[in-house]
Image (cartoon, grey):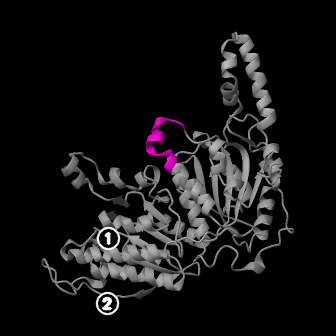
Amino acid sequence: MYNMEKQHKLGKLHALERICMLLDKDSFREIGSNITNQEDAFNIRKGQFPYDGVITGYGTIGGQKVVIYSEDFTVIGGTLGKQHGYKIANAIKLAIQSRCPVIGINDSGGARIQEGVNALAGYGEIFYYNTMASGYIPQISIIAGNCAGGAVYSPGITDFIFVIDNISQMFVTGPKVIKSVTNEDITADALGGANVHATKSGVAHFHMPDEKECFRKVQELIAILPPCYEEGFLHSNRSSIPAYNTEIVFNDSLSNVIPKQSNHSYDIHDVISGIVDDDSFLEVQEEFARNVVVGFARIKGIAIGIIADQPKYMAGVLDCDSSDKAARFIRYCDAFNLPIITLTDVPGFLPGKDQEYKGIIRHGAKLLYAYSEATTIKINIILRKAYGGAYIAMSSKHLRADFVYAWPTAEIAVMGADGAADILYGKKMKDMNPTEKMIFRQEKIDEYNEKFMNPQIAAMNGYVDEIIKPEATRERIYGDIMTLAEKRSLDHVIKKHGNIPL
């Protein structure tokens, strides 16, 4: 029944092999195996294609129930007809009803042209249920072959997209169409391969070297995600979670992470690893917009989301792509009641005409909107720089963070002392001789540093809740999560919904 060899010759696993490799042994139960195509058109007869080219059913991953579908490229190129589309839509519907994650393995030549508008109807059903599921259950897409034309929009709606080297291809219009319209020659891999979507477009969330490693990473992701928004981080196994005043351990390594010179870089992963459980950090979109790091982790077993500026790349400045990356991740965590831990070291928004033309105002607004709208637990640690509008955007008290802490190395101000001195005293220094100017300028820099470049002013005004020692950060975060476990939002405006600046 299954043409395994045909798929193996393409260097890919068969649709059924993929399901069996991903799920727990013997847990898969197929649904709809007897459904076939219903159309007689263009040399196609009714019932010609077994299971209409897509295998659907349910199973478990690490004991967690999931619904899964896997397109079979060996059956008319995995093309999507009406029955194929309805099978996928019904799988997503089943996942919603079962309150569990849905996983789609995409390997398709696109819409089945022979079925005309009925094929498009199949896509429409899928998109509708993708949207229904969004924010209620996790949706994971694995691009294990071709995914072109309208087919790309189902993964585009889902929460996480996995791409695989030398296998994944995603694009709205393929190389042949581009050649005919623009006369541009480009390969499918250069247009929409795994590396393109992991590093440039930001479409992909996980970039994997092969199928086996891809499925292992999916299993790791499923293990940390709540299966439904109603079952957030603390809604199960409460008895196994230690009280915040027991098993206290301070991490002394964090006291030496921040360089003494404020213009020196460091790797934010060193801070993250000093806060979360060992080997628990699962980074998302690792290769895209690397000036911001986002991902899932655990603190004493509690699942959390982390958003952190990365001083190692572009000094951790916010730009269009990093704003989008962080905002989408914030909204996911909020939808599933995962606490959001923000690690702030941001010198500002990236200046320049390129960013202004690209719409940094619109993209930066998404970050402000996402943090403001989120009602899950929000805890912010200001590690070092928190300048200007970017200070506000990174989960500040003004956007209703529950707790904001500052390390002693924190610098909270409109801008850096050097720039402030030049703006405030530029006219006065204009007529000074070089020596006099240098001395005067340094005096004003020192004065600005003393008055503004420390967390004391913000703490005095209540914008910072406490100035804490770095080594106590993990315990402080955990205690806050335990205290806020039953958090309910006090602010509620009756409206249909807001208008996020998309």
Along the line of sight, which residue is nearer the eye, 107 or 424? 424
Q: Which residue is identified by label 2?
A: 34
Q: Which residue is identified by label 1?
A: 7
Instruction: In the rendered structure, find residue 333 and report the number of the disc placed on it.
Output: none
Residue drawn at x 26%, y 53% as measured from the top left:
175
Using a 10 Å C-alpha cutoff, classify the residue at mark 2 as few (fewer than 14 neighbours), some (14 to 19) or many (20 or more): few
Outermost residue to the bottom: 34
Residue drawn at x 80%, y 29% as measured from the top left:
447
Verify whether residue 157 appears in magenta: no
Say left or right for 104 vs 245. left
Give coordinates of residue 207: x percent, y percent. Answer: 48, 58
- Which image quadrant for residue 46? bottom left
Say left or right for 79 vs 230. left
| Total labels drawn | 2
Give coordinates of residue 418: x percent, y percent. Answer: 69, 28
Cα distance in 3D space between marks 1 and 2: 22 Å
Q: Callout 1, which amino acid?
A: Gln
Outermost residue to the left: 43
Start-end of magenta stretch: 351-362
Along the line of sight, which residue is nearer the eye, 358 or 126? 358
Q: Callout 2, which amino acid?
A: Asn
